[in-house]
Amino acid sequence: MIRNSWWRYVPMVRNTPKIPKKKKKKTEVCSRLEAESGSMVYTAKVGPSILSSDLSQLGRECERMMECGADYLHLDVMDGHFVPNITFGHPMVECLRRCIGPDPFFGLEALLTLCRITDMHMMVSRPEQWVKPMAAAGANQYTFHLEATTNPGSLIKEIRESGMKVGLAIKPGTTVEELAPWAGQIDMALVMTVEPGFGGQKFMEDMMPKVSWLRSQFPSLDIEVDGGVGPDSIYRCAEAGANMIVSGSAVVSSDDPRSVIALLKNVVMEAIQKRSLDR
Ligand SMILES: O=C(CO)[C@@H](O)[C@H](O)COP(=O)(O)O
Ligand SMILES: [Fe+2]
């Protein structure tokens, strides 16, 4: 039974430290926690976007990506309104869960496989309406667009109460300062590096200052980049401070997805290591 299963509430490897209740600036809290732990608290992760894959073989494609070393799967939900394209919704996520997810009682390995499946990139108007259906379908993280809602605070709360992690995305035209007030309440910030809607577009290097700024202000935050990211652009993303890497066509269309995933991850790991040595 997929709906309301207990394993949905088992967190992915937690990389956002618990913020003390006392009111403090996010930057102060992060610096203190990092100073105490003596290390960076985020890790390199690669999440293939399966938008560019053969959608008639979606279950198989997701399995293939996980076998090739994907840390998570990035699923692009488009409603034909927020973006000029349509993909799929929660019924398909539920089917994927059934298809890919092994019996959670098979043990820790199976549990980890389940936990890393679904980062839902919600390119939809009124993202509020799909929180509960996505949670029931087995989504682990719900990433909504700041441009699509008038009340990010209550949406963040609702996503958390539904047992999912919270991602907040911004389109290329939205400034990072607009995202900043919510950064202390989210698990991940997504900086779009193409106009959302289609895979296979050209990487927008001019988005990198947004990533650098976020990394400097929120040293422990998971920062994701999405759009045109592959072996050519990964160095810029890693240098700017992104640690969650979405890659669609560069991974999915490659003859050797395993090597591409490994390369992307290594470049980010090296940048994280360098950053921690430089501090
Ligand atoms: O959200 C989107 C596009 O809107 C992305 O997730 C793309 O699907 C990534 O594909 P590539 O640009 O890497 O081919
Ligand atoms: Fe995406």
Image (spheres, rainbow, N blue to C red):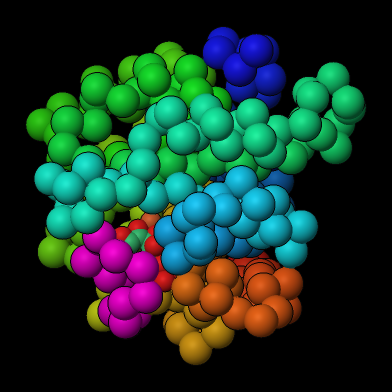
Tell me which residue sits at (45%, 48%) in the image. Answer: 75
State the quadrant of the N terminus. Answer: top right
Tell me which residue sits at (36%, 35%) in the image. Answer: 89
Relative side of 130 to 266, left or right: left
- Ligand 2, by image quadrant, is bottom left
Relative side of 179 to 236, left or right: left
Q: Look at the picture and state if 73 lies above or below 23.
A: below
Q: Quadrant of residue 88?
A: top left
Q: Is residue 86 visible?
A: yes
Residue 161 at what x, y percent from top left?
A: 43, 14
Closer-to-camera residue (45/116): 116
Closer-to-camera residue (158/131): 131
Relative side of 112 to 27, left or right: right
Residue 191 at what x, y percent from top left?
A: 33, 60
Q: Is residue 219 visible?
A: no
Relative side of 205 to 245, left or right: left
Instruction: Please identify the residue farthest to the front as the structure is shown.
Output: 56
State the quadrant of the C terminus. Answer: bottom right
- The region drawn magenta spans 193-205
Q: Look at the picture and state if 11 lies above or below 207.
A: above
Prevailing secondary structure class for the magenta stretch in the rendered image: loop
Residue 13 at what x, y percent from top left?
A: 69, 39
Closer-to-camera residue (118/63): 63
Magenta stretch encompasses residue 197: yes
Tell me which residue sits at (55%, 13%) in the image. Answer: 3
